[in-house]
Amino acid sequence: MSVLVTGAGGFIGGHLVRGLLADGMAVRAVDRKPLEEWYQIHPDAENIVGDCSLHEVARGVTTGVREVYNLAADMGGMGFIESHKAECMLSVLINTHMLQAAREAGAERHFFSSSACVYAAGRQSDPDVTALTESDAYPAEPEDGYGWEKLFSERMSRHFREDYGLTTRVARYHNVYGPQGTYAGGREKAPAAICRKVAEAVVNKTSTIEIWGDGEQTRSFMYIDDCVRGTREIMAGENAEPVNLGSAELVSINELVSIVESIAGVQLERKYRLDAPQGVRGRNSDNTMFRSLYGWEPSIALKEGLEKTYAWIYDRIRSGRPAL
Ligand code: NAD
């Protein structure tokens, strides 16, 4: 029996499929995008194009699978989620139908990829932020649109477990980055966007960089390898409550830019766009619960992960390959 990954044509899904295959698992990979638009295609997986927001598709792809990693979602960075709230909320159809399908198929486990966007905005108003702990999700005041949908679907996962006995697992991802992810087109997140802007400046021999906000907003960024490892451990483990999966290495966006500049060997003049979307003022992951459950925490250093991410994005831009 195989393991199902939805959203497999996307960033995290593509890496997760690779990891599962490497461990000898039979993997069914599903995404709504045409195959030629998948970020990674693994020939050893059973690759299916299908829209999991439709119940019959969700049911079809879940038939005969042992575990479901549900990563499919309409999502993006702040620029996308602040202006596509209805689209983000429509992911509730994916999450509803994947839970129903997993139950109907008698799957042993169902994993839902939630987000740090479920956390109350009032706790993220200072760049010198106190790291977010799991209980901070309530009283509920999540990111409008995207965050509300994630919180609702977390809750639905919980009730499928309590009422129907489906084993559900939920991770709250904090900003994930790495190669083979979105870096252009409006859905990209800060690390990929900054790598792209610096790489474009190097390739085009320009000297300025546009930064959204004043650059003093803070975040933590988790490298993809830590994300895949953590996802699989959460799925395999006994904890059923939503748990943070993120790095606790807090940096400002200005610091992020400086790291990428040092990797690229340039220094650019910074132009701050104060009217651009910038999300909460500060956000970090409190990993106390994760550490106590799994005995480690995401710790691949930002500089190390950015070196790999920048090299991959620079290479694509320099060689004129289509942007993801
Ligand atoms: P991504 O956009 O690269 O991948 C998501 C994939 O889902 C896309 O390829 C998309 O085509 C697919 N999809 C969308 N609707 C679908 C549908 N109806 N049926 C089938 N496939 C569909 O995003 P990602 O960064 O890989 O994120 C994966 C999951 O992790 C998402 O649920 C996202 O909300 C969550 N998450 C990601 C981050 C992050 O920093 N990347 C942070 C928090 C949560």
Image: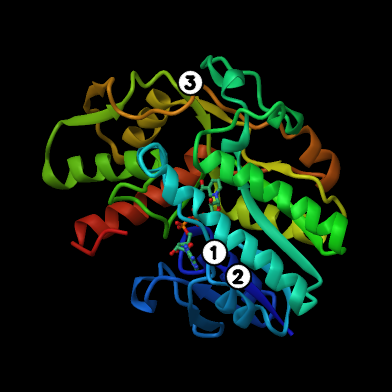
From this viewpoint, is residue 180 visible?
yes
Q: Position of residue 193 (x, y in %)?
A: 33, 42
Label 2's element? strand
Q: Position of residue 84 (x, y in %)?
A: 38, 44
| Circle 1 crowding by C-alpha within 10 Å: few under 14, some 14–19, many from 20 | many
Left or right, 13 with respect to 253, comes to right
Q: Which numbered disc flags the more N-terminal residue, 2 or 1?
A: 2
Amino acid type, mark 1:
Gly
Q: Is residue 1 above or below residue 199?
A: below
Q: Position of residue 151 (x, y in %)?
A: 64, 42
Query: Mark 3–mark 1 contact, CB under 8 Å?
Result: no
Where does label 2 land, which residue? 5
Left or right, 282 with respect to 100, comes to left
Q: CA distance from mark 2 to mark 1?
A: 7 Å
- Considering depth in this image, is 293 or 154 the residue closer to the camera? 154
Query: Mark 2–mark 3 contact, CB under 8 Å?
Result: no
Query: Mark 2–mark 1 contact, CB under 8 Å?
Result: yes
- Considering depth in this image, is 91 or 116 the residue closer to the camera? 91
Where does label 1 land, which residue? 13
Amino acid type, mark 3:
Arg
Q: CA distance from mark 2 to mark 3?
A: 33 Å
Q: Is mark 1 within 8 Å of ligand 1?
A: yes
Q: Is residue 291 above or below residue 153?
A: above
Going 62% across and 68% down the picture, which residue do you hit?
Answer: 19
Name the mark on residue 281: 3
* Quarter of the image where the C terminus is located: bottom left
From this viewpoint, is residue 175 visible?
no
